[in-house]
Image: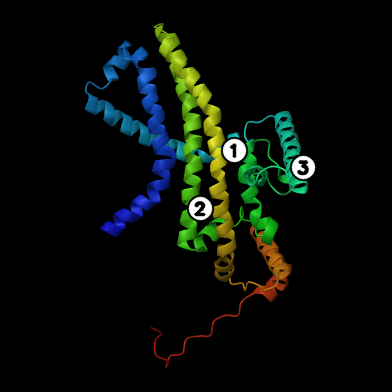
Amino acid sequence: MGDIAKGVLGGAWSLLVGWVLPTALNFAVFLLTAAPSLRDLALVRRLWPSTEGDTALLLLVAAVLLGLTLNALQVPLYRVLEGYLFWPSRAYAHGCIRHRRKKRNLVNQLQTLRQERRGTTTQRSLLEERVSRYPIEDDQIAPTRLGNAIRRFEEYGHNRYRLDTQALWNELTGTAPDEVRRQVEAARTSVDFFVALFYGHIAVMLSTAAAAVYSGKDLALPVTTTAGLLLLLPIWYRCAVASTDEWAAAVRALVNVGRKPLATSLGLELPQDLTKEREMWTLVARMSRRPYRDVAATAFAPFRSEPLPPPCPRCPPAL
């Protein structure tokens, strides 16, 4: 029974911390700021809990339901912040150009510090950290800081081994060691937490402003709350970008450690030559993305592992 509970809690940890907890925090802020302005309305007064216990239950149920909803919508939520969804083409192009220029400036600053041996080790390390949050290839640059911070580890497998982690993500995580896979999930939880806070603050700001205007009461509390949340938005965004460092390290470990069991599960032998390995993963990516062609049988032949011999009926079973 204890193992079952541990497994359930372990699988739900990312959901609870990444989406339900920040949703509960935002909903609590809403109850303290917007709710008092709405209590005089007949419909709200009829539905509002009469005791503190009922209010706490309402907070818990609303946080869980909204957290589950945000978790289901995490792909479009991330894509908006990464610059892929609802971005006009001009804004997308301008953002990419701006971040390419910013990356070049950071690289030039770092090279100058190294050549002239200026600055402390800490200063150079912080500058290297900022540079590392960009993709290696300039054609992979995204229009936002969060988009670039995530794109850098999305391209890692392809850049090193020609392993397309986007196309083979389910296979890679399904065959990787459990500890490495849990590290990736735990590292992403921190980013999810700040992303949920970011969107939750926007929702609280809008609902608080709408409640204040509709009720016509004192606007001091709603205005203060809106201003405070507005100041917190860039902080949570920067925290989400900084939290991708641990996520990137976990994905790198997943690719480095998980590619061998992935190859074995696909019936392939991992070549000792890195050039051959890159050729093999290129073929695997093409096989997963494109329709099958007969030439693939010949191309995969050098990398196919030999089938296991049939079991011996007279041999004792292996222990």
Q: Residue at x 48, y 43 (%)?
A: 190
Q: Residue at x 27, y 29 (%)?
A: 56
> Helix, strand, or loop for circle 3?
helix
- Disc with the residue nearer the chain's start (2 vs 3): 3
> Tag 1: Cα neighbours inside 10 Å, few (<14), some, or many (≥20)?
some
Quarter occupied by residue 286: bottom right
Q: Position of residue 66 (x, y in %)?
A: 41, 33
Tell me the element at label 2: helix
Cα–Cα gap, marks 1 and 2 = 19 Å
Q: Mark 1 highlights which residue?
A: 79
* Residue plotted at (56% across, 58% down): 253
**Percent x, y for residue 42?**
30, 11
Q: Earlier in the sequence, mark 1 or mark 2?
A: 1
User: Would you call the spot at circle 2 few (<14 residues within 10 Å), some (14-19), or many (20 or more)?
Assistant: many
Q: Nearer the viewer, residue 292 or 254?
A: 254
Residue 266 image point, x, y percent: 58, 68
